[in-house]
Amino acid sequence: MSIISTVAQHRQQFIKKTPTVSTDFTHYEDVFMEVHEKIRFIRLFKGWSQEEMAEKLQMALNGYAKIELGKVDINLSRLKQISETLGVELAQLVGLNEKNVFNFIENFHSFIHQQSNNSMADQTTCKHELEKAYLIIEQKEKEIVYLKEIIELIKKQSDVYQN
């Protein structure tokens, strides 16, 4: 069996399993697919082999296979090229829709709030440590004054014995 017929057979089986296939990624399941999974899904939906896709992108088959397996980070220019080749919007491919942007903003605000709380905790810890350092310095200064008094007393006693 040739590679092309294997891919075509795989595509038919894939389509039978998913009767309502949409490449606009508005279905609940599609939103949670990783980018590399979406790329593979659309390629298979179009009936293209990895070799054909790699050729369309003017890249080595090995490099393209790594993209589909999620083994490499894809730079923005390559993502744009892939989305144009597949005929989908880049925002759809990477999963940027209103819901995801809102979730991103919410997560960002939570992150900032958490960092702010961590910063406050860090500031409190630093303030406490600084207060401890001031107390230690104050104690050391008192010890220095005490030691100077002892030195003066020893000098006076030494003068008394010498006279």
Image (cartoon, grey):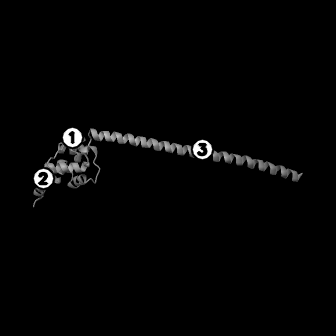
Residue positioned 77% across, 47% down in the render: 149
Q: Mark 3 to mark 2: distance in Å?
A: 71 Å
- The amino acid marked with disc number 2 is Lys
Please tell me whether mark 3 sits on a helix, a strand or a loop.
helix
Which residue was labeled with disc 3?
A: 131
Image quadrant where one finds the N terminus: bottom left
Residue drawn at the location 57% of the way across and 45% of the way down: 128
The mark that comes first in sequence, 2 or 1, is 2
Upstream in sequence: badge 3 or badge 2: 2
As measured in the structure, the alpha-carbon distance from the residue carrying label 2 to the one carrying label 1 is 25 Å
Query: Do residues under tags 2 and 1 come within 8 Å of each other at their CB atoms?
Result: no
Callout 3 crowding tier (Cα within 10 Å): few <14, some 14–19, many ≥20: few
The residue identified by callout 1 is 89
x 37%, y 41%: residue: 108
Question: Does residue 60 sit above or below 93 in this rendering?
Answer: below
User: Tag 3 or tag 1, which sits nearer the N-term?
Assistant: 1
Q: Nearer the viewer, residue 27 or 162?
A: 27
Is 148 left or right of 68, judged from the image as shown?
A: right
Decide if residue 143 is in sight here: yes
Q: Is residue 55 visible?
A: no
- In the image, residue 120 lies at what x, y percent? 49, 42
**x, y (%) of residue 123?**
52, 42
Residue situated in front as seen by the camera: 70 or 33: 33
| Disc number for residue 16 | 2
Q: Secondary structure at mark 1?
A: loop
Residue 88 figure quarter: top left
Q: Position of residue 19 (x, y in %)?
A: 13, 49
Q: Are marks 1 and 3 in contact (CB under 8 Å)?
A: no
